[in-house]
Image (cartoon, helix red, strand yellow):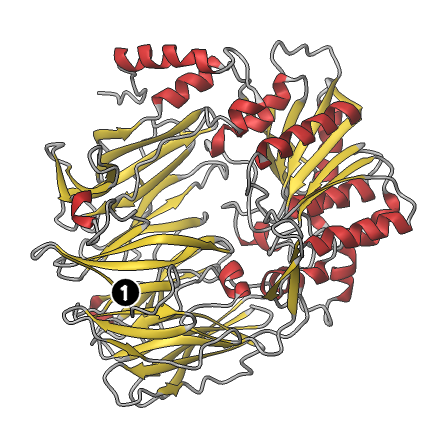
Amino acid sequence: MKRFWIFLLSSTAVICCATSLNTYAQGKLTLEDIYSNGTYKARTVKAFSWAGDGHSFLTLEQDTVTGGQDIVLNDIRTGEKTVAVPASALIPDGGEKPLEIDGYTWSPDRSMLMVYTDAVKVWRTEKRGDYWLYVPATGELRKLGRPDFEKSWMQFAKFSPDGSRIAYVYKNNLYVEDTAGGEVRQLTSDGDEVIINGQFDWVYEEELHVQDGWRWSPDSRSIAYWQFDTEGTGTFYMVDNIDSIYSSIIPLPYPKAGTTNSAARIGVVDVDSAGPETRWLDIPGDPREHYLARMEFVPGTCTLMIQQLNRQQSVNKVFYADIHTMSIDNFMTDTDEAWLDVFDNTVWLDGGKYFTWTSEQDGWRHLYRISRDGSRSTLITNGDFDMESVVRIDAKGGWVYYIASPDNATERYLYRSRLDGKGTPRRLTPEDAPAGHHGYIISPDAKYAMHTFSNSETPTVYEIITLPDHKTVRILEDNHELAWKFAAADPAPMEFFKVDIGDIILDGWMIRPPHFDSTAKYPVIFYIYGEPAGSTVQNAWLGGELWGRYLAQEGYVVMSIDVRGAKTPRGRQWRKSIHGKIGILPIADHAAAVTKLLQTYSFMDPDRIGIWGWSGGGSSTAHLMFKHPEIYSTGIAVAGVYSLYLYDTIYQERYSGIPSLSPQSYHDGSAINFASGLEGDLLLIHGTGDDNVHYQCCEMMVNELIRQGKMFYMIPYPMRSHSINERENTSYHLYKSMFRFWQENL
């Protein structure tokens, strides 16, 4: 019997949705509905996690009595819901309301629950807060830490493997606390604004995607942790001019390309030792010219596996480090002529005889099985395609489940391969499933998965399925109300296309205005990113691309093209062709693609071609406006890096090289050096509180445009970050301003 993939709406839902149509403009998108009213906000399955019993999962659900959140156990087989931890149990003594659950962790034996609450955003994520310990058997609920600890300053609390202790970071120092008696011991004391223990500096967090900087040993007796000495790292100062009658200075240690990095090292502290004192691993290499990118204990041993990248990030030395003898063994080295990415999918197999490793050594991103001594490797995910990401390694069953899309880089599907490398990969997402992005959270025994699906016209659907047959057990959330509102607004569809620019074929999408007339001439707005950290052309919901559809509704043709280097599964050569060519090759690709499209589509008005982008897309926009004024007449550059020297070491040096060794790459890749080419209308937008791409970038570009006698437009957003969405009314104001600019200039 053929699967029926359409998720039906109940009659109750239809009535509810039809009634709600009165609250927004029927048949039309509005900026108010998109950016102010939350009309098109998607629903999710909150805090989904597998329970560990093989047939249940946990979610957070609102408790109508207390107003708090219940931790709910959901039985897959019956659909029955059982409150595992009621919100009422999480009301502190003397309190009136339950703790707000920002995260939670069970002890290894599931007899205790640790709740993360009062989370505070630090740069990108809410990584600082408070922790409470709840013991269901006794009803005990107590706040972790010392009485003198300041509110919302604890980080990365974790149970020891034996459950007897919890360790955490407080103000750059490590502490350990007994779960039974609550005794607290301080393990490090040198942490301050310069020395960072147990977490990472700004650039590691941003570019190596790490935050939690310490690990329990399997025997619960020791902790290994990163320490950073930021002395000598350049400090960037942000200025807050709006929260007081006097400005305040916000210092940020931030190594810009070619400058001094923090010195990183790894130490080991024994939690029961007198003192206690840290013993430091003597890892070869200048600690400011290398990155200690990953560190994990080999399961069941006192041995650490440590990955060390050179500054160019083209060599990854992998070490074993014995925390008792402190001996170091560089047993494996991975290299690439361009750069190496670091992955978090190392799993130990066959009792520690082998481990999994991701490499692009054959031109595709694949998973390998490596012998413990690094001498033998076996290809697991064999084939001429990229393994996009590992979902689950089922060591017992002998399978790896992963996301791939061999035939279309804009889509994603579930595959599996044997861990011994034998046989051929098998696609588990059914062939008759709708095209788009399919995501999975697979249960530990690999019998079930929480499956998500979306595409450019379908908001995300969440369901439980069985594996490997991919049969639906029950739908958790189908976002039917959002889908109904979206359809009622009558948005133009997103059409995917390919454009051949001679030496490469690029993916793109297009949204045409309603009531499109192929004989007319339309202004065209291109959305671009143009760097390796992302992709703009994906057949996924991604918020519905409502901004692009709104512009189409107002009479514009909207397009986007993924140029070479974009983060898509098209092989190593595609991704790494951009090495040393940031702001160079992608710009040439885009200009060539637009030229070809103008020859293909007569409805594109060659005198009204607009371009806009954010972050790397802001940089690309400036490049295209300056280098190809004959094509692009109007541009909006949001939060762009206009000089590669102004961005951080890890990202910029990974893709552009070391400045002193690659001066031409930095010159040609910096849009500021081509500002004299501006002929059209350019709007610069930047948040003055941007810790990522500093407002300095915008000011330097402004200074150069003035020097060149070029007229331009500019909107600064005071104390907004890189996302420019903080404080009241910001997003609506931003997009309304951009729309006005398009109206007046394109």
538 w.r.t. 32: above or below? below
SS state under label 1: strand
Q: Quadrant of the C terminus?
A: top right
User: Where does label 1 land, which residue?
Assistant: 158
**Towards the viewer: 695 or 480:** 695
Q: Is residue 122 left or right of residue 625?
A: left
| Residue at 75% across, 26% down | 598
| Residue projecting furthest to the left | 137
Percent position of residue 463, x then y = 27, 32
- Compared across the picture, whether 717 is left or right of 271 comes to right
Looking at the picture, how far across and down is residue 672, in whole percent? 80, 52
Amino acid at the residue labelled 1: Lys
Which quarter of the image is occupied by the N terminus? top left
Q: Is residue 146 visible?
A: yes
Looking at the picture, how far across and down is residue 414, in whole percent?
34, 41
| Image side of residue 558 versus residue 98, left or right | right
State whether residue 496 appears in this view: no
Q: Residue at x 68, y 21 (%)?
A: 556
Q: Position of residue 634 (x, y in %)?
A: 78, 32
- Seen from the viewer's position, the closer of residues 551 and 25 is 25
**Left or right: 26 in relation to 232:** left
* Residue at image location 32% in from the left, 71% down from the top: 215
Q: Nearer the viewer, residue 189 or 341?
A: 189
Residue sticking out furthest to the right? 709
Question: Across the whole image, how many numbered discs are drawn on residues?
Answer: 1
Relative to the observer, which residue lies in front, 699 or 162? Answer: 699
Within the image, what quadrant is residue 62 found in? top left
- Category of crowding for the residue at label 1, using alpha-carbon neighbours closer than 10 angstroms: few (below 14), some (14–19), many (at least 20): many
